[in-house]
Image (tube, rainbow, N blue to C red):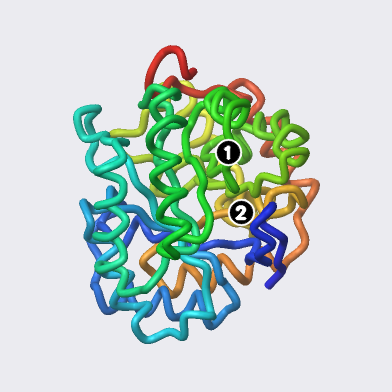
Amino acid sequence: MKYRVLGKTGWKVSVLGFGAAPLGKTHGDFSEKDGIRAVHTAIDLGINFIDVAPYYGLTMAESVLGKALAEIPREKYYLATKVGRYGADEKDFDFSAERVVRSVDESLKRLRVAHIDLIQCQDVEFVNVSNLIEETIPALLKLKRQGKVRHIGITGLPLKVFRKVLDKTAVDTVHSYCHFCLTNTTLVQLLPYLTEKRVGIINAAPLGMGLLTEKGPPKWHPAPAKVRDTCAKAVAHCRKTKTPLPHLALQFATAHRDIATTLVGTSSAKKIKESVKCIEKDLDQSLLAEVQDILTPIRNEIWPSGRKENN
């Protein structure tokens, strides 16, 4: 396993991180025993960064993860969770000081730990940035002084919102998704800005939230039909080779040296083993060029998320 420094945190995190959302049945049903085994397997293979949120499975993911972590020495991993989002609708967002403080305490209990390494404001494009800066982050800084959290980050889909926050306040990490993968690489445009501020970069959805898989994206996926169809062509092309498209996509996403860690969400020990094995292999540049050519018609397409002013 390779490791990179996560910005000003100074942590050396595994280039492959464990995304615990599937432990909340976000990707389908699973056996809790298998989910716990997946976490243990990830740690055994050198993965030391784990990301979860109360929103995933409406607290289920945190609860299952807590059971898994109870059997692992605390120094073996960096644990990240989130505040601010607690459901699928806009009414389920609450970034008030009172709620985020309570949220951290609730997460600590579910995760069965004494502190959270990285607390992240989730999907900040859905909140007025001024509220985030004037109320949410100060409340989290207070929790940091109390020792309940170690570092503070933000997550979101639109890249624009990261600048809006970082121009006005300091955070330790940004967690971006669907902006550094085979279909979209626009995150690279923000890297010099983030590097200058020593902000650690967490990349998520290297498979485009299912677009780059044999199974395909879930029904709720916001990508238009053109994007879905083009990705399906790329999947079919790779099916003829010895390299499945998800493996190529993961190799591509983890290769960028300025991106500290890329999250892979799973509740399967087998898939974790496959993911770790595939990133240890050299990237097939010829196949990569062929796939990128297929994906050219949808290059860097993205969908809106959150408030209009944050997109």
The residue sitting at the top extreme is 309
The amino acid type of the residue labelled 2 equals: Leu
Question: In this picture, is 73 found above or below 46?
Answer: below
Of residues 49 and 303, the one drawn nearer to the viewer in this rendering = 49
Q: Position of residue 64 (x, y in %)?
A: 27, 70
Which of pointers 2 and 1 indicates the residue nearer the eye? 2
> Residue drawn 40% across and 55% down?
143
The amino acid type of the residue labelled 1 equals: Ala
Pointer 2: residues within 10 angstroms few (<14), some, or many (20+)? many
Left or right: 119 as drawn, with respect to 47: left
> Residue drawn 47% across and 68% down?
271
Dot 1 lies on which element? Answer: helix
Specify the quadrant of the image occupied by residue 147.
bottom left
Question: In this picture, is 155 found above or below 129?
Answer: below
Residue bearing mark 2: 250
Specify the quadrant of the image occupied by residue 233.
top right
Q: Which mark is residue 234?
A: 1
Left or right: 304 as drawn, with respect to 233: left
Q: Which mark is residue 270?
A: none
| Placement of the N terminus among the 4 image quadrants | bottom right
